[in-house]
Image: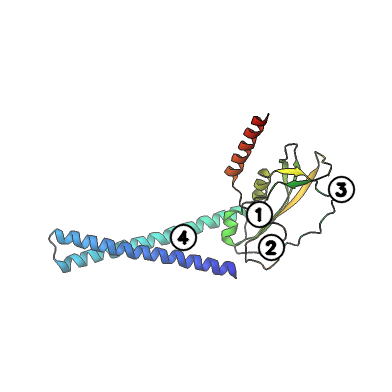
Amino acid sequence: MLVRATRTASALTIRAVFYIALFVLVVVVHMALTGALREMGWNGGLALTASGAAVLALVLVMINLADWVRAWLAERQELQRVRLRLPSGPCCVVWQTPEPVADESDDAMPWEPVGHMRARYPRLPRRLGVEGIAICEFEVGADGRAKNISCVDAWPSDVFYRAAREALQHAQFQPKYDVHVRFGASYRMPFVFRIAGASKIRDGGQRARRLRPRLAAAQRAVKKIQGGGAQ
């Protein structure tokens, strides 16, 4: 309900801005054209009629152009939806957080992310109101970076796996305190992509921050420079 209301408000706002801008343009063009015709020697009534006809033609052209652009964008979005195998309408995912695994178990992951995991919500699914999940399997190298990333499961489209893989590629891991680290072992991590207000379930875990690949690359470069200076 919240997502639908937000979209309706956004659509109405965009439409209102368009018509206000069109009204301002009509007034400005009408006054300028009327003044120019009067300076050319046209009488007031004829100049007003001619400028009004020209402005009406301009308005019709702009409205038809806006309709064409809207239809073209809708067709383009539909082609992208089909290519990404996304559902045609909004869908919500209900994710039940699994039971926590004891640290002393062999299945426990001895690594923990440094800071927050940053995942980028795919643009088209967010626009369509589509939620999804992705479960990734990966290894952690000696530098604390994920490698050999593969998809275990993704629903309803692989576009969520690509977003999760991007997040893992920019993540940094560190060993947990007083835990033995084994290299070469594979681990699984679920990613849940949810839109605020689309489903009424309690959030589990920390909220992911927005992923900025350029910022992450700059931070890694600074760390390398600092590490070289320390040596």
* Mark 3 or mark 4, earlier in chain: 4
Hey, what amino acid is under mark 4?
Ala
* Mark 1 or mark 2, earlier in chain: 2
The quarter of the displayed image where residue 18 is located: bottom left
Residue depicted at 61% across the width and 64% down the height: 90
Q: Secondary structure at mark 3?
A: loop
Hey, what amino acid is under mark 2?
Val
Q: Secondary structure at mark 1?
A: loop
* Mark 3 or mark 2, earlier in chain: 2
Which residue is identified by label 2? Answer: 93
* Mark 4 or mark 2, earlier in chain: 4
Which residue is identified by label 4? Answer: 71
Disc 1 to disc 3, how far (Cα)?
A: 27 Å
Q: Secondary structure at mark 4?
A: helix
Expressed as whole percent of the image width and height from the top left, the position of residue 66 reads: 40, 60
Report the mark closest to the observer, 1 or 2. 1
Disc 3 to disc 2, how far (Cα)?
A: 30 Å
